Structures are given as C-alpha cells and as structure tokens.
Image: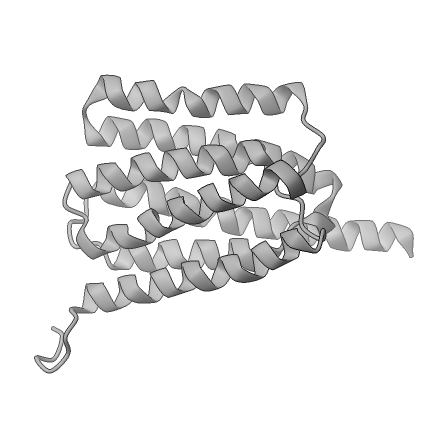
Amino acid sequence: MTPSFLPLSFTQILASISVAIVLYQYIPYIRSVFVGKTKPHIFSWFIWGVLTAIAFAGQIADGAGAGAWVTGFTACGCILICLLCWRYGERSITRSDWWSFIAGLSAIPAWLITKEPLTAMLIITLIDALAFYPTFRKSWYKPSEELLQTYMLSGTKFLLAIIALENFTPTTWLYPASLVLMNWGFVAMVFWRRKRLKRKES
C-alpha cells in the first residue's frame, strides 16, 4: 500500500518511471540518427507507431490505468522517429520488408473488425513481431547502425509497465510482455553479431 502522504499510488509511480525511461531512451537515439550513426528502418517505426497506438486504445478500453501511460508515450516516440526516417533512415528496402509492412497495416482493419480487445491484442502482438523484421534483417548485416541502449530501455520500461498494471488480464499484459522479449532478444542478437564481425576482422 502506498503511504498516504504520497500524491501518487504505487502503480502510478512505476508508470511515471516508465514514462521517464521513454523520454530518456529516445533522446540519444534521435541524436544518433541526426549525426548519421543510427539508420532506423521506416517500415518498422511506422508500424510500431500505429500498432502501439492501437494497443494503447485497447489497454484504455480494458481499464489498464497508469500501466497504459508508457504505451501512449511510446506511440508518440515511434511516430516521431518514423518522420525522421524520411531523411535519415535506412535506404535499402527489400521485398520482404514490404511484406512485413503490409502485414503491419493489416492490423488496423483487424482491430476495427473484431471490436474485442483481447483478439485485437493477439493480432497486434503477432504483427508487431513481423514489424520487427525489417530492423532485425538490417541489423543482422549492419549491427553497428542501431543504438542498443534504446532497445534495452524499451524492454525495461515495458517490464515496469506490466508491474504497474491495475487490471492484470491477457489484454493488458500480453502486448507489453511480447515487447520485453522482442527488444531484449534484439539486443542479444546485435551484440552477438558485433562480436562475431569484429572477430572476423581481427
């Protein structure tokens, strides 16, 4: 129980920390994009922005409370980075990237058709994983073009968001849990690829 002298509840405090992480994680990433060190893939960031916005709506509909704050702020961050991709992003776009992009966009009508939060969360979780493909593919060959701090913090903020959920149901925890696994899995992959390529060069 949160002490009475605190203006926020325990879940609101955790949610506020998660939002602070969101704001902190995107500052270095955006700076890295501007200097040309990081090359974000526009398809991934566009889909992430759209799907995270849909997930946020689903969480609000199911009463997630403060635990949904981080999802809303993340949607804004993804959309901002997507806009930066037009000038500073990855230029090599493959056919498989296009397929993942189309799959991501298909989540929007799926959300409108189902009208049921849990079904929408299942669809969004699956397609968000597909949306990771362009960034995963690019980073497999160019592991130095992503800032791992951003993805590590992304997984952390969603872990805190899960703890902060006021209504713990599959609709509210499934999506952030999948983001924890995908972000930390991506960090592990890029770290391994960097070490492997460095070993080949030496």
Name the image quarter holding the C terminus.
bottom right
Compared with residue 160, is residue 88 higher up or lower down, i.e. above or below?
above
Q: Quadrant of residue 15?
A: bottom left
Q: Residue furthest bottom?
A: 5
Q: Residue furthest left?
A: 4
Q: Is residue 155 left or right of residue 31?
A: left
Name the image quarter holding the N terminus.
bottom left
Residue drawn 31% across the image and 41% down it: 174
Total numbered labels: 0
Camera-side residue of 112 and 185? 112
The picture places residue 144, in percent across and down from the top left corner, at: 73, 51
Q: Is residue 171 visible?
A: no
Residue drawn 40% across the image and 46% down it: 76
The picture places residue 83, in percent across and down from the top left corner, at: 53, 40
Residue drawn 17% across the image and 71% down it: 8
Camera-side residue of 50 and 193? 50
- What kind of colouring is applied to the model shown? one colour
Q: Is residue 68 left or right of residue 187?
A: left
The picture places residue 95, in percent across and down from the top left corner, at: 65, 18
The picture places residue 87, in percent across and down from the top left corner, at: 65, 40
Q: Is residue 153 left or right of residue 95?
A: left
Q: Is residue 94 left or right of residue 100?
A: right
Residue drawn 65% across the image and 53% down it: 34
Q: Quadrant of residue 43?
A: top right
Q: Is residue 138 visible?
A: yes
